[in-house]
Amino acid sequence: MRLIVHHDRLSVAVWIRSTDELPQKVPAGRRRDEMVWLSRRAQALLRLGADSICLVELQSPETASFAVRPALVDDLPRVSEVDIAPAEVQRFGKWALAYSGGISIPVRLRGRRVPAGEARLSRLMRTLARVDDGPHPRIRLSRYVPEKLHWKDELRGRTAVAGRIGVVIASFRRISRYAGLVAEVVLRRLFQAPPLAMATMEAQLGDDTNRVVRIPDETFAVLGIKAGDDVFVEWADQRVIAVAHQSFVGEEQDAIAPATVDTWGMDRDVAAAARHLVIGVGAQLRGELRIPRRTIVNVRRRVTSIFLRRMNELTVPVGGLLLAAAAIKDFPILYVVGGTVVVTVLAMLPARYRVPPRGRWP
């Protein structure tokens, strides 16, 4: 479960782990039931001393239980959306966390004509969330509370350079990334990049520091990419960029014992129903997104990198067209511009995500 830890004016999101699972030493003069142990990363973000005992406030966001109902076929929720009553949307806000089957899922809430206390989920969400198949399945929704970090920490994650120089470098990088995000949104309108909900598992050996995610071969066509393309990995309002490669399981991989045991990708129920919807995410990417090992993320292709690659491929044909036009005396410039536009449009058409026309055809 996700909790918010407050100290002074700062707040950091943490994930609960029982002391029975990870025994901790209780300081002298303290009781176990009044102690909370934070990771060094959380202590650094809250500006706490690594070895000191400080007073912090734990906030458990409002949580409510809902009966699960199938979504309506004529108004299917999109990826990671849940339909509830409009009054409940005002209560929880735009984003919420859904808890089911031992995992947490960020979901967007849609106000629909749904009875109070009920939530409509698509089959994809019910499968990934491991919703019980019993006669009365339920899911818990909790308000999503964003973090509030020190302004230097908001920038520090974008550069490893310390001091004032690091702040300046991080500021320029942040501005450039905002500009890149605006360009991505504009290009996404033209070329389309639909998101795909995928269940996370631990990264394969060697991927933790390479900013690589592993997805099955059949998922590349669904996302509209090929191996080696950039993708956005999104969790609620957080996003990172990673390189997508094929997931692999072979004799050499099986012969190496991992440091921890994670059977999420081997789960029979999930593998049978959604084997192509499991993604391996490294520890570094999970730390930047502030997510646990087991959750649901949205994955979509990065249109900017695809657009730039297509533009690079146009260098030779467009350059040849311009040279040929320059060799002809008094060749109309309007024809040159028109030919360049036609060549560019035809070259960009394959980059658009293929979406079949909707509705019944005669």
Image: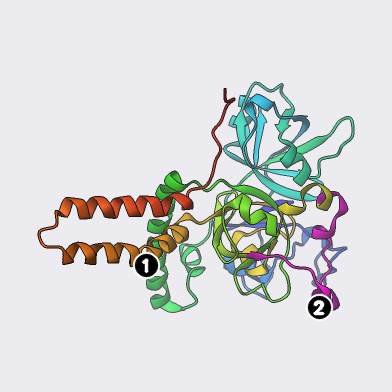
On the image, the x and y values in percent for residue 216 come to 71, 59
Nearest the camera: 186 or 86?
186
Q: Amino acid at mark 2?
A: Glu
Q: Residue at x 72, y 52 (%)?
A: 277
Which residue is under mark 1?
Answer: 172
Secondary structure under badge 2?
helix
Mark 2 vs mark 1: in front = 2
Alpha carbon distance from label 2 to label 1? 44 Å
Extreme front residue here?
328
On the image, the x and y values in percent for residue 221 come to 62, 53
Nearest the camera: 225 or 41?
225
Crowd tier of the residue under label 2, counting other residues whose Cα lies within 10 Å: few below 14, some 14–19, many 20 or above = few
Q: Is residue 223 left or right of residue 251?
A: left
Q: Residue 247: within the magenta?
A: yes
Q: Which residues are magenta?
A: 245-270
Q: Residue 139: within the magenta?
A: no
